[in-house]
Image: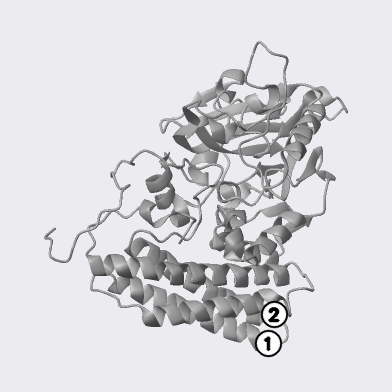
Amino acid sequence: MVGGEAASNLPLSSDLDDRTVAYVLKARESFERLRRGASQLAGLLVLAAIGSRTAQGNPMLEMATAVHQEAADGLKALKPTAQSAHHHFHLCRAAERLGEALTITRHVLHLDEAVSDRVSGLMKEALEDLRWAGRALPGFELVNFSQGCCAMHGAPPSRDGNKTLRFRSTGERA
Amino acid sequence: MTQYSIWVLEYAYVANYHVSGIVYGAHNQGFRKLPYCYVLIKGNGTVAMVDVGYNEKDVGAEMARKFNVEAWQSPAAILSQCDVTPEQVEHVFLTHAHFDHMGNTDAFPNAKFYIQEKEVAKWVWAMALDQRFRWLNLATDPNDVLRVVDLARQGRLICLDGDKDDVLPGIDCRAAFDTHTWGSMFVTVRNGGGGSVADNWVLAGDLVYSFENLVGQDPEAPPQYVPVGLGVGSQTNLIFTTDQMVQEGGGNVERVIPIHEEGLRDRFPSRINSNGLRVTELALADGERSRVA
């Protein structure tokens, strides 16, 4: 699940065929893991940037590496459809870039300026891919607003009316 | 002598926000408008802000679609109402690390950003927890984390360790640990310059959302403090912080400014712009002209 929302409350709006819906439900795990891994590595960069001595050897690096591996394994098992191909492309590229950022970080002794530059650049690219993935299909959110304090939860349908999950079987015409 | 001009600037709003999110325990009391604002402080030869709003490019579409946030305007457009550009802003006090308060640091290329070190450290700590604890990371944008990295590496992030007087002349940062967030803070502007607390303004961030958090919901009953609808820390800490803010405002609850309070427009001189967004003028420095007249 992403953002703590039950699948039945997915804000899916488009007409998606069954196989794409199945893809969405499985891909959300990988998306969430990539989001978590990226956040954890970004957190590590924060510690390094503010001069914390706990940056190097911080267990967050191993956690991010593990969660990235889980995401990568999940991605391999996905079966993208024509409707989800664009989403899948960005998810895979995000995983690739995050993986590269993690590899660099794990193989240096110190997060010096040059290394941080490289890692930070890859992270930004990975997050941009996650954002594009989030735009390609409904149900993928980079920021968890589900119980945020200043957002309107359970909002009435917005102006485009996109609030409810609509499934369409593969045989049904749009 | 008034040292600083202070404006509360609305940059977006939610038309219908549930009251229980504003006042702890106020269930089944319907909905009201929730403005999103930041504060502009100008005087003593500098320009400062309290919080910077969020970045429309990153989260705006999602906010609009999912939460009906409306009418977002850029800092350039909003600040121009006070004849200020984002480039002129030299200091920003970040009250806490939620997206709608610190999500637009990129818009202020020449500013230094002040935040409590505990807010950053606990933010990072929460990211390392198992996903069962992900509620603690709500409203955190991973892009904000990277923006903090950039600021720190550019020498533009100043981490405060608790209270700090005179961060700028007459402007104090006050830590409010384990309240709305782990490392929240509020900002007190001692605007008289002569030591009189009657001239103080207390800019509360999200430590109070509305006047009701300061005086309670029953106008017939003796005033009481009621915490906001969300705290990752303690409600006890929130209401004692509220009392501290009132004391810093000279005991006058009207000197504690809840930026999410629509009623500011009735209490202080205000005007509504063509986009339906409000400018509220709390104080004018000597020689400064009104932007709401």
- The answer to whether A42 appears left or right of B159 in the picture is left
Residue B123 position (above or below residue A37)? above
One can see residue A98 in this view: no
Left/right placement of residue A59 relative to residue B37 reads right
Q: Answer left or right for A65 relative to A30.
A: right
Q: Residue at x 69, y 54 (%)?
A: B113
Tag 2 subunit = A
- Left or right of B25? Residue A16 is left
Q: Amino acid at mark 1?
A: Val
From mark 2 to mark 1, how far is it between C-alphas? 7 Å
Q: Do the residues under discs 2 and 1 have CB atoms within 8 angstroms?
A: yes
* Mark number, residue A108: 1
Residue A145: % across, % down: 50, 51
Q: Which mark is residue B12?
A: none
Q: Residue at x 58, y 67 (%)?
A: A39
Position in image of residue A53 (x %, y %)? 79, 74
Q: Residue at x 34, y 41 (%)?
A: A158
The answer to whether residue A93 shows anywhere in this view is yes
In the image as oriented, which residue stretches furthest toward the top?
B220
Query: Tag 1, which chain?
Result: A
Screen quadrant of the N terminus of chain B: top right
**Observer-nearest residue: B107 or B184?**
B184
* Local secondary structure at mark 2: loop
Nearest the viewer among A162 and A117 is: A162
Point out the image quarter for the C terminus of chain B. top right
Residue annotated with mark 2: A111
B64 to A110, vertically: above or below: above
Residue A100, horizontal then vertical, whole percent: 53, 84
Residue B94: x and y in percent read 67, 48
Above or below for B214 versus B111: above
